[in-house]
Amino acid sequence: MTDADSRKCLGSSLRYWAETRPDAVCLDDGKQHLSFAEVDRLATRYARALVATGAGMGARIAWLGKNSNLYFVLMAAASRAGMVITPVGWRLAVPEVRYILEDTRAPILLAESGFADSARAAADGLHFVQHLVIVDSDDGFDGWVAAQGEAELPAEDTARPVLQLYTSGTTGNPKGAVLNNDNLFNIRRKMASEGPEWAKFAPEHSLLVIMPVGHIAGSGCGAIAFYNGCRGVVRAEFTPDAVLDTVDDGVTHMFLVPTALQMVITHERAARTDWSRLQLIMYGAAPMPLELLRQAMRVTGETGFCQQYGMTETTGTFCSLPPEDHDPAGNVRMRSAGKPLPGVEAKIVDDAGRELPRGAVGEIVTRSPLNMVEYWQNAEKTAETVDSEGWLRTGDAAYMDEDGYIYIQDRVKDMIISGGENVYPAEVENAIFGHPDVLEVAVIGVPDPKWGEAVKAVVSQKPGHVVDPASVIAWARERIAPFKVPKSVDIIPVMPRNASGKILRRELRDPYWAGRDRAVN
């Protein structure tokens, strides 16, 4: 059996490196260094405890916490136990956490002490939550594990779901994108053998994992480190200082959203930081302004840059712009999202799904082993997103040039990307409806120099009422996560509508994007 054959699942990949490089550092969260042998042992112990709870095959394990070594050990343990880890965004409000618990019917909720109150409030009255464990309390997770005993483990399966990530939906309720081991690792094998040079990670590399694990950029980077046997440098949350500290410590690879990258390269420490050991900065989750990219290249010197284009439903990156297409002077290709990865098909189609000629704008669709298994318990939305032939609709409008490079123009859907976080207007609108002074509301994204896009609410007033913008923002803040709360509120007398009565968000957006070459920032 080849080493690639041994690395088809989270657990088996970890076992391979535990046998090959037992003493090498697997996880480093700044508090604790765990070797591959230690992580392998812990993952097995935790997996046996999870099975011993009687939760059953396919049970969801909810994690409410920041990035940590423990989360990634649990990720491997879930795969060995035949269960599914479901990281819950720690920025979410209690009603949003409760929705995810109700949707997954997770029998096990693991929370860090900083989120204990939220965990208890969200789980209150949910009888199916049989185990609520505060993992860093006095008793701690190890005490809970010891109390469960041990059970036999099932065989790992590449087709079995292992990770469920929640992505907001246009109807206002988030959807659980279900990913299996094959989604996480199938393309990795192809990339290692015939992929571009930037994608060939080696055991001596170290990969920074600083984006939230509730996003594919966080959990996905951890999986890449597991597959390649390199050190996963895990940090609880993004701060510019945390990133620069890891650069000083010799991290070789990282992924950052553009907003985070901007904060890092404009930090007062950046100019005196030694970037020589950092080999590659991958960036994505939102379009990168060309001038910001050029500035980042100047600050970091010889560090390579690679744009990553993808989505939760495609297990992250399915299209990339490699370092060789980046030019400090700027070039046309730096405005593109790059080309599909090896083993990935992509094309531009019209509304009826017919492929369009090169240069014509339509919707990007893609087909590959990266495409999600399904939206959890939502066959209708799954069928709307992935057709019978396996083509997944991205919701992004773009054209493809003669060389196969994809140039994103706008979003087919109304999603706002603010600081790398996906915000759907319907979700924010639902939170604002009910405000005593608001008659109607439409939410749009407007250009923002720091966040890429900022959330703006446009409202009309009930007759005889006066809307205070600050009260609308406060109202929303009580109901949704802070990053979804509008930064500003406009008040207009009447909403623009089409013939069928639908509010025309584009008419509200257009004045803010006038003079720009694309309607995403």
Image (cartoon, grey):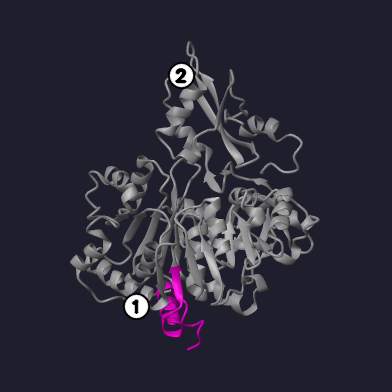
Can you name the residue that lies furthest to the front here?
272
Against 407, residue 150 (above or below) is below
Q: Kindly identify the residue that appears in the image at 76 percent across and 43 percent down.
A: 517
What element does badge 1 sit on?
A: loop
Residue 371 image point, x, y percent: 53, 63
- Badge 1 is on which residue? 155
Q: For the residue carrying disc 2, how many other residues have a C-alpha within 10 Å: few (<14), some (14-19), or many (20+)?
A: some
- Marks 1/2: CA–CA distance: 58 Å
| Of 121 and 66, the residue lying toward us | 66
Residue 8 seen in render: yes
Residue 263: horizontal and vertical position, in percent?
60, 48
Residue lying farthest top? Answer: 464
In the image, what residue type sits under mark 1?
Ala
Q: Is residue 487 left or right of residue 236?
A: right
Q: Is residue 196 visible?
A: no
Query: Mark 1 packing: few (<14 Cα in 10 Å), some, or many (20+)?
Result: few
Does the stretch in magenta take in 26? Answer: yes
x then y, percent, for residue 95: 35, 40
Residues 180 and 61: in front is 61
The tag on residue 437 is 2
The amino acid at mark 2 is Asp
Span colored in magenta: 1-27
